[in-house]
Amino acid sequence: MEKDCQARKLNREDATDHIRWRKQIRDENALQQISSWMTVNLLTLNSSKTEFLLIGLSKQLAKINNCSLSTTHSARHLGFIFDQRLSFCDQISTLSQSCYYHIRQLRCICPYLNFKTASTIATSIVHSKLDYCNSLYYNLPKSQITRLQQIQNFLARAVVKASKFCYITPILHSLHWLKITECIEYKILSLTYKVLTTAQPSYLYHLITVQPHHSTRSSSVVTLPHLSSSSLRVRG
């Protein structure tokens, strides 16, 4: 009886080792495919600076264990920080730190600047950071959007030399600035219009379909179909 138990235990350990070995081979093959794709496109994979990020829901990430690759909680790509759950908490925290630093510096020199110069500096140095890749903020929780709106409010009051108790809407109107949610929607609408009118970039144009609305009072509806994981491919 004792020998049978030991045999079963050894079988379970062998099976676990075999599964772990297969996962390692799969991860190594995926890494090799990425390296080969980059070589074909005249790129080089720097293993010392490469970070691997697994993105998914909490339940999905919990199912992935014993990964042979060293993964990270968040990674920076083209100056934008992505995290595992695409909540962009790290991105907004880093953005807030940078923006508030520049706003404090701007407030120090604002008494010596006229309105036009202060507005130009604020737009080029700080507001451009809020606008960068802001379409990715679409449909984020209200708490995250509020953090971005607070940065814009603080910046606007610094430009017009207003106190923190002043109502923000008239100030934004005087600066001709859209609110954060409006900026996000405007960016998405602009990108969609560009794709529909120019058919570029092609990888986005082929994803969008225009469906005529049944009601005579409404115009056509632009839809983006849901893609299955099997249909996703690396594009060269």
Image: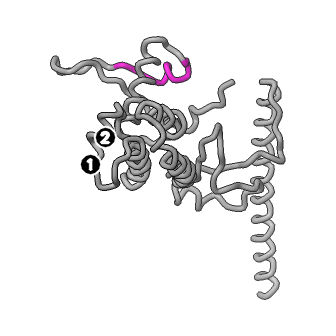
Say which quadrant the N terminus sits in: bottom right
Task: Reply yes or no: does residue 56 show up in magenta.
Answer: no
Q: Amino acid at mark 2?
A: Ile
Asked whether 86 or 102 is in front, the reply is: 102
Q: From the viewer's perspective, is residue 126 above or below residue 231?
A: below
Query: Circle 1 sits in a helix, a strand or a loop, which is it?
Result: loop
Location of residue 210 with respect to 26 vertically, above or below:
above
Q: Which residues are magenta?
A: 201-210
The colouring scheme, among rainbow, by chain, secondary structure or one colour, is one colour
Of residues 10 and 81, which is closer to you in this image? Answer: 81
Residue 167 disc label: 1
User: Which image quadrant is residue 11 in?
Assistant: bottom right
Extreme residue in the front direction: 112
Q: Residue 171 bears which disc, if any? A: 2
Front residue of this view, candidates 109 and 61:
109
Circles 2 and 1 in contact, beta carbons < 8 Å: yes
Q: Which mark is residue 87?
A: none
What residue is at 77 percent from the left and 60 percent from the top?
20
Q: Position of residue 125 (x, y in %)?
A: 54, 37
Residue at the (30%, 46%) spot, across then down: 168
Quick check: 218 left or right of 40? left
Q: Provide residue 128's location: percent of width, then percent of height.
A: 51, 35
Element assignment for label 2: helix
Q: Position of residue 113 (x, y in %)?
A: 47, 37
Q: Amino acid at mark 1?
A: Tyr
Answer yes or no: is residue 194 visible.
Answer: yes
**Distance from Cα at disc 2 to Cα at disc 1:** 7 Å
Residue 129 shown left or right of residue 50 in the figure: left
Residue at coordinates 66% horizontally, 48% vertically from top-left?
75
205 in the magenta segment: yes
